[in-house]
Amino acid sequence: MGYALVIDGRVHCPASGPGTIAGLPARSELLGGTGQLESTVSDEAVLAAARRLRILPAASATRANGSAGAVTDLLRAARAGNQQAGDLLAERARVLGESVALLRDLLNPDELVVGGQAFTEYPEGMEQVEKAFAACSVLPPRDIRVTAFGNRVQEAGPASSRWAGSTPIRWARCVVPEHWTPGCRIPSRGRSLSAAYARAWA
């Protein structure tokens, strides 16, 4: 999880290195964690909670696809009607919604687009995301859309925002990727990013 500015289609990497949202405040008795976002909603945190609740078996060192396969198993269990699995994923969605609200209130982008497998692989959780977002944001209502990049969102970066016209950098954007490499370009899908809609991902 990171935080950066995108200017004219490129991620700006500060001299001291990229920022992070991993330490944003997050609370969840069900998921556990240290009170910070990454330790609460990361795949590792969710899978640890699922194993603690015996929704999933203990991690196997010999499993070929590792955590990705375990996440798939958890999603499958929730969709098959496992109440605990569904509650766990709904709780992650709630925490994510609260974090999106915090970022929205800070940056106030013109458009909100969320991305990352927590959203794209489990669209059923968007209702909880939207409810938590609406309950926590202090600004007027704003719709949330899921990125069109799907699971390729890591290539695009999960957050961007156009600042208001009063800012010296008119087309500055902030990027909050789940997995992000400083200096990478943000795909524009055939358009100049400076001409694209302002967006924010989480």
Image (cartoon, helix red, strand yellow):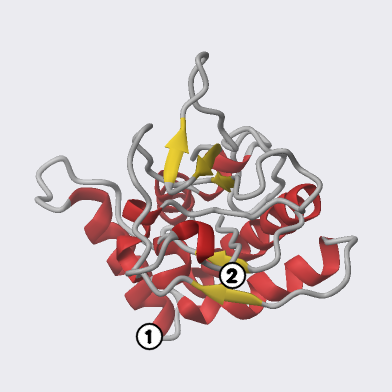
Label 2: which residue?
90
Amino acid type, label 1: Ala
| Left or right of 42 in this view: 165 | right
Q: Residue at x 76, y 51 (%)?
A: 102
Residue 3: assigned label? none
Quadrant hosting residue 150: bottom left
| Quarter occupied by the C terminus | bottom right
Label 1: which residue?
80
Quadrant hosting residue 135: bottom right
Quadrant hosting residue 121: bottom left
Q: Does 17 sit above or below residue 59?
A: above
Q: Could you tell me which secondary element the residue under label 1 belongs to?
A: loop
Q: Residue at x 43, y 51 (%)?
A: 157
Amino acid type, label 2: Ala
> Front-most of 166 and 18?
166
| Left or right of 161 in this view: 152 | left
